[in-house]
Amino acid sequence: MTTFHNSCDCAVVSRTTFDLLVVGDANPDVIVSGSPRHPEFGQREQLVPAAGLVLGGSGAITAYGAARLGLRTAFVGRVGDDPAGTFVLDALRSGGVDVSACVVDPAVPTAMTVVLVDGDDRAILTAPGCLDRLAATDVPPALLERAAHVHVSSYFLQPLLARGLAGLFGLARAAGASTSLDTNDDPAGRWAGLADVLPLTDVLLPNENEAFAIAHAVSGAGVSANASTGAGTATGTAAGRTASAHTSRGAGTAAGPSLGAGAGAGAGAGAGAGAGAGAVAGAGAGAGAVAGAGASPGAGAGVGAGVGAVAGADAGAGAVADAGAGVGAGTGAGAEATPGRAVRDDADLERAVKELAAHGTLPIVKRGAQGALAFADGELIEVPARPATVVDAVGAGDSFNAGLLAALLRGLPLSRSMSVAVTCGTLSTRAAGGTAAQPTWEEATS
């Protein structure tokens, strides 16, 4: 079983300013609760029970949550020179996140998202603004050299960043940092460009639907039910890196916790197979939808029900929750829900994660109320979720990310780190918005 070693190099720690550098999206979320399913036009005014203006964006929510968990955190993103941009930067600063390297764009407005919540469902409307202008070159090289870990969010919403991500991760790793990626959804449904990035990504953090889509995209021929599944260990990663071989970086606690980049990432050559479940759904499925073998394209488009829904995964189309109350569609902060996704079984998911691991990354899949699943050192690791009463699942997957990185950077074993992550995702659903209920380290580990 993979272990993330806490073998701190004092010389490295002494020049490390930040435990975590997050690069990605940030925007205000306007959450409208009790929205009618079909708002009336014709200048009709309709009253709703509540609305709130909160910090949104997968990257921003992850950074905020990591800082609350005690990590020295910096964020690089792009906002407009407008009140929305000021709101975003002020919110991050108030949470203890360093935003000194953020770009304020005078020409393009800050991205904005409106979330219309109707019971257990939601519609998400996003004006991308300057989101697609963030580039890898916006990240100062000196900042990479001062970070123990670099996390990137919302790959497909930021094409310039995506184009330069392999180079950015290469520079980060050369400087001694480990890396992680949460792609979030691809609104275009193409899932392209990741083959060169995954070998440089120490930890990949998809939800179930994203795991299937990425596995299908990088496998070339798709995830085939007849392909052999992976074998091998983290010491045989495509990147050829292990926790012990990589320079560990301190995480800013008294014990100097660290995450050895590459630890557990990937499986040996020949690993990875998939299942027919990775096939692209036929006509009628939403953009980027993937359906299980024989599944109708429209199946599984709904979200699960239940008190206790969502532990770690952002509530998205096809997310499953415990019986009782539902979770709304959407992939958290500002991401667009993808309809028409079919339910697959655990064997299909296992084949998909093995396919991802064969590309040199450690896949850790967010499974909502089912917890999380990873594949490391040739073994599957499953962590369950605890039931919880859900108020709002927006950003739960981003809080999962924050919890996982905080635990790994403190030197906790992978399975324990996943448990902390699932707890962080679950606890974040106690209040509306992505950051209001994010836990402290004490709450997440008690």
Image (cartoon, rainbow, N blue to C red):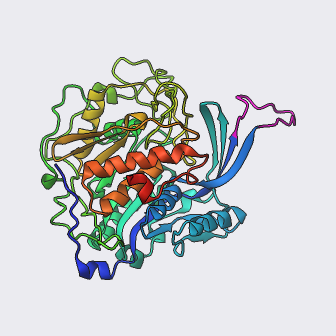
Q: Is residue 60 left or right of residue 258?
A: right
State the residue lying farthest toward the front.
446
Regarding residue 317, the answer to whether it shows in the image is yes
Regarding residue 222, the answer to whether it shows in the image is no
| Residue 4 sits in quarter | bottom left
Question: What is the x, y in percent for residue 290?
Answer: 41, 30
Question: What is the x, y in percent for residue 255?
Answer: 29, 71
Q: Is residue 277 left or right of residue 306?
A: left
Question: What is the x, y in percent for residue 147?
Answer: 37, 72
Q: Nearer the viewer, residue 13 or 438?
A: 438
Q: Is residue 402 left or right of residue 109?
A: left
| Residue 349 sits in quarter | top left
Check residue 130 for magenta coloring.
Answer: no
Q: In the displayed structure, would residue 121 be above or below residue 265? A: above
Q: In the displayed structure, would residue 335 be above or below residue 71? A: above
- Give the residue drawn at x 31%, y 52%: 417
Question: What is the x, y in percent for residue 258?
Answer: 28, 67
Q: Is residue 168 left or right of residue 73?
A: left
Q: Nearer the viewer, residue 242 or 13?
A: 13
Q: In the displayed structure, would residue 385 be above or below residue 177? A: above
Check residue 47 for magenta coloring.
Answer: yes
| Residue 367 sits in quarter | top left
Q: Main secondary structure of the magenta part?
A: loop
Q: Nearer the viewer, residue 250 or 334?
A: 250
- Give the residue drawn at x 47%, y 52%: 154
Q: How many marks?
A: 0
- Give the residue drawn at x 20%, y 63%: 5
Which region of the structure is painted magenta?
Answer: 33-48
Q: In the displayed structure, would residue 84 be above or below residue 322? A: below
